[in-house]
Image: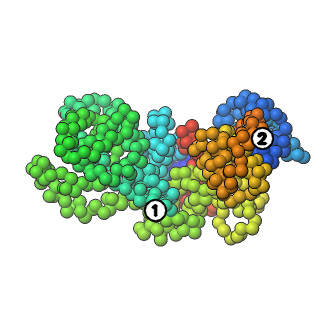
Amino acid sequence: MSRPARALPRQLPAAAAARALRRAARFVRRALPLCRAHTVEFFTRGLWERLVVPPPHTVLEALRAAGPLARPLAGASDSAAAPCDDDMFSSAFCENSEKLIDVHLFALAAKYYSLSNLGVCTPLEDVLEALKGNSQGATGIKADEFMNNKKSHEVQVMSELVDNIVNYCGIKQVIDIGSGKGYLSSFLSMQYNLKVYGIDSSNSNTDGARERNRKLKKHWRAYQSRGRANLKPQSLEKTNDRPVESKMKSKTINEELLNNAKSLQSRDQVIMQDLVPSCGFTEMGTFETRTETEADLMPQTKSHEDKLSEEVLAILNVLPADAVEVFSSSHRNWGELCEEEKVQRKKTSPKTKATKSSESNLYLPLTSCITAETELSDIVTDLEDCVMVGLHTCGDLAANTLRIFAAKPEVKAVCSVGCCYHLLSEQFENQEECCDKVWGFPMCQYLKDKGWCCGRNARMSACLLPTESLFYRAVLQVIIEEMYGVTKSDRHVGKTFSKSSSFIDYVRRSLKKLELDDSKLPDSCIMDYYEKYKHRMNELEAFNMLKVVLAPCIEVLILLDRLCYLKEQENIAWSGLVKLFDPVKSPRCYAVIALKEE
């Protein structure tokens, strides 16, 4: 099927993407000593004295005065002023000592080199408009229509975009890489009638996704059967009289089901004939389930049926008929069926059996570990022209998704939202490791030629813990080095902070995890360390904030690296960065999107 003869949105030229990458890299390189510093060593290595000149209170005041980092700089997009600004921002750090000397300039630079300010992103509205053209696709979804729920927001926005991409490309198959619990895959198959293969390396994720999807289908069919049989005529009239309101309710209930999909996994012991009549929507939009006997449920069934309204039917209309599993006759006594239903079942039963396999495979979870060399045809036996997607694919998986897209002719488009940057492998981080490995960073030729390395601590900047937790860990490090003479250890204290009732409890739990004898330390000695450093907690807070401010700049570097890699490929018709989600609801909100030439 040929693509529509309409233009894709204007894309950022390869030269402009490379120029933005070079400018961002220049600033981040100056900030790397700060980025790479490990807060665990804050006191033991005297990091404040080594890296920051202004006192902590000055740093905190300057960062607070800078305002929200997402706010664009006035006039910052003026290309004529760019070289001057780049030089100016570099002077936030001392040329010789590499210390931070101007916090105000530092905060301005962090805004200046953000994705929103560099002008490298394509608006989502432009992409959707170009893909849809004049066709009547799915109704556009605006962020303010969503519930305050991260997963619901992500899945609905991304699935609408993916549906428009597959329609534009004229294909029906989607490969969801790192599909996890299957939220996106299930929604794409049920809402948009796409054939989706969800690939995840975890067997437990795959099994859970398969079971969750099966139960979701049964819930929808259950509500459909009972809702249509018991809906009062006046309810139908009200639904027809209020199409807009009904549509909004449909969207809301659809979100509620999506939000609560996770809860379905734990209900393996509840048989459907008990589950269906005892399900109701609470005010919070969750399912209430009971496991009483059928006799206990009989009085409740009538009351629930009486309460069914057009809102229940609204759930069902989001699904195509062939996306829903058909109940076997064992779920309902034959005698309860009216004659018309019996005749209809006899007619459709052979057809149902013949097509049940293909219907249930509209979404198929698969277990496999994806690398850059993965042959998709070895995993997906009926591989055809497809779109590859990934919602918060972790670490190297996002980079490998783009490499597979570029290399495999069957993959016509890609939409990838990455996360877990701290798990990326870096080619130039450890020179002792093998050279022929495929690395997560860098991908583009420019950063490879420069031997660019962020370092794990820099990539961890967006994953920082609360200040008190960091303070506990930094003081613990002093105790470990001074009292036990240990400077390096392969062991980690993990999530000890959240389980501890006090600093003393935290230290003792941590020492046990590190296999160090805590009996040699009386409580008074532990508290002496706490008292010694507690007045310096504001230093750690300020240092923590500096790293948080830098985190978006590290993300800019990683995302522009991926975009520039795509710009280097010869067979790609369009590529861009798109702000897909509301960053308040979903901080990892940028998608790397590309379509191949026809």
Q: Position of residue 482 (x, y in %)?
A: 79, 50
Q: Residue at x 25, y 45 (%)?
A: 292
Mark nearer the N terminus (2 vs 1): 2
Q: Residue at x 70, y 70 (%)?
A: 434
Residue 23 can be seen in this image: no
Q: Residues within 10 Å of mark 2 (few under 14, many from 20)?
A: some
Q: Residue at x 20, y 42 (%)?
A: 296
Question: Which residue occupies the foreground of this view, 161 or 421?
Answer: 421
Q: How is the image coloured?
A: rainbow
Question: Which residue occupies the foreground of this view, 432 or 507?
Answer: 507
Question: Which residue occupies the foreground of this view, 560 or 12?
Answer: 560
Q: Quadrant of residue 527?
A: top right
Residue on which the image places disc 2 = 82
Q: Quote the CA–CA distance across marks 2 and 1.
A: 50 Å
Q: Which mark is residue 479?
A: none
Q: As drawn, is 151 to the left or to the right of 444?
A: left
Question: Which residue occupies the foreground of this view, 72 or 521?
Answer: 521
Q: Quadrant of residue 206?
A: bottom left
The image quadrant where one finds the N terminus is: bottom left
Q: Residues within 10 Å of mark 1 (few under 14, many from 20)?
A: some
Q: Position of residue 535 (x, y in %)?
A: 76, 34
Q: Position of residue 245 (x, y in %)?
A: 35, 31
Q: Residue at x 20, y 46 (%)?
A: 294
The relative height of residue 20 versus residue 467 in the rendered view (above or below) is below
Residue on which the image places disc 1 = 203
Q: Quadrant of residue 325?
A: bottom left
Residue 67 can be seen in this image: yes
Amino acid type indicated by mark 2: Ala
The relative height of residue 232 versus residue 566 in the rendered view (above or below) is above
Q: As drawn, is 234 to the left or to the right of 408?
A: left
